[in-house]
Image (spheres, helix red, strand yellow):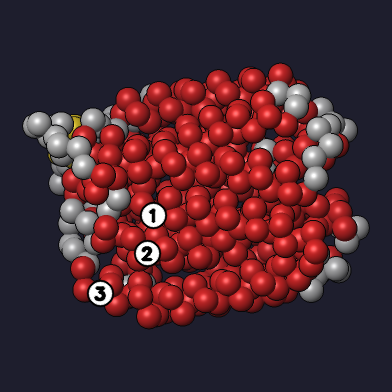
Amino acid sequence: MITQKNNKTLFSQNFIHLTISVFLISTAFYFLMPTLPVYLEEVLHAGKQEVGLIIGTYTLAALLVRPISGYALDTLGRKWIFLTTLSLFSALFLIYPFAVTLLPLLILRFLHGLNWGASTTAGFTLVVDLVPVEKRGRGISYFGLSFTVAMSIGPVIGLKVMGENHFTALFLVAGGVSVLGILMASLVKYPAFKRPENPVFSWKMLIARQSVPVALNMLILAASYGGVLTFITLYAKENDLNSYTGWFFTITAIGTALTRVFSGSLFDRYGPTWISVFGMIAVSGGLLLLAHAPVLSFFLISGFVIGVGFGVIFPTLQTMANNVVTRDRRGAANSTFLTGLDLGIGLGSVLTGVLSEPLGLAWTYNSAALLAFSGLVFFLVVSLPHYMKFKQDQ
């Protein structure tokens, strides 16, 4: 179990060091988001379905490891899992220049996804340990800014480093940035952890059952967005907007950051209902706009609207997932929630690759908008009533 001091400070040194650490590894992660599909198409001559498969493999690996890492975090401790998986995550960037065919790259992406899944599960569990319970919504929301800012600058820097197909430099710089994240993580003073005596393994321990409805809600919404993350560079090329792909990610991140600043405070004061409804409508509307975005203004505005929506949805649903479990099940709660996120993004990537061949990306994004709206219906009918019934104050 975790032993916490009665500390009411949100922006402690530990919180700041942890946030910067996750920001750096996330920046390295987002280096490859818009550039890897280009590498696959131009260097390895992969088709859209193969691009979707390889990108989806990354999230599939994270999906598989999250339940195991959640159980390990609750029974073995946070610190060594976090630092070990960060180290492996960084080292794997150095192998990319040697993966010159599809199968080795597929295996490498799977291994990379395993360490991404374990390290981010540990990071989100640690931040819940470090922030006061009455400021949990704000803590998760502000901590999530590390991902948001990384989403903003990572793709832009990645595209700049790649330039005219400088892929080796891209992979090495990503690895270097990730190493800086390890250095920041080593500065965190981790909460004392007492291992439970004689822990008994059970398959049920891998999943936080009370967090499942919220995780399913995240899965639905993430699936609607998975195709945007994976195929936006190719969609921009189809519409002669490829030089604005970096701006799309930047503006999306700005929208996310703006709403994250106040969404956590609104959650702590008023609960999840209305901010979640607002966020899910924004995502659905932004995807509709993207589907009809052959011109620059619609293209960029759609990114902002989608970012606004996810800036509300992600921290709100994650706080809900943590608020329905006891303290000793936080690892499982975060792994369950993030499993929904990863599975959604992976399924969205694969389905977009499959559907875009016969339908085209525009019609596929129309379908994604409908899927996002179904996430709102699921929230009102399933997730919210479940949360109100099982919410805990610890």
- The earlier-in-sequence mark between 2 and 3 is 2
Image vertical order of residue 169 relative to residue 32, above or below: above
Q: Mark 2 points at which residue?
A: 214
Is residue 367 visible from the viewing direction of this image?
yes
Three-letter amino acid code of the residue under disc 2:
Val
Q: Residue at x 15, y 37 (%)?
A: 200
Outermost residue on the right side: it is 240
Q: Residue at x 72, y 67 (%)?
A: 364
- Cα gap from disc 2 to disc 3, whole angstroms: 12 Å
- The earlier-in-sequence mark between 1 and 3 is 1
Three-letter amino acid code of the residue under disc 1:
Phe
Residue 103: x %, y % from top left? 68, 29
Residue 389: x %, y % from top left? 21, 73
Q: Do the residues labelled 2 and 1 touch (CB within 8 Å)?
A: yes
Q: Which of 138 and 329 is in front in this view?
A: 329
| Secondary-structure class at tag 2 | helix
How many other residues sit within 10 Å of disc 1, few (<14), some (14-19) or many (≥20)? many
Q: Name the residue under label 1.
A: 337
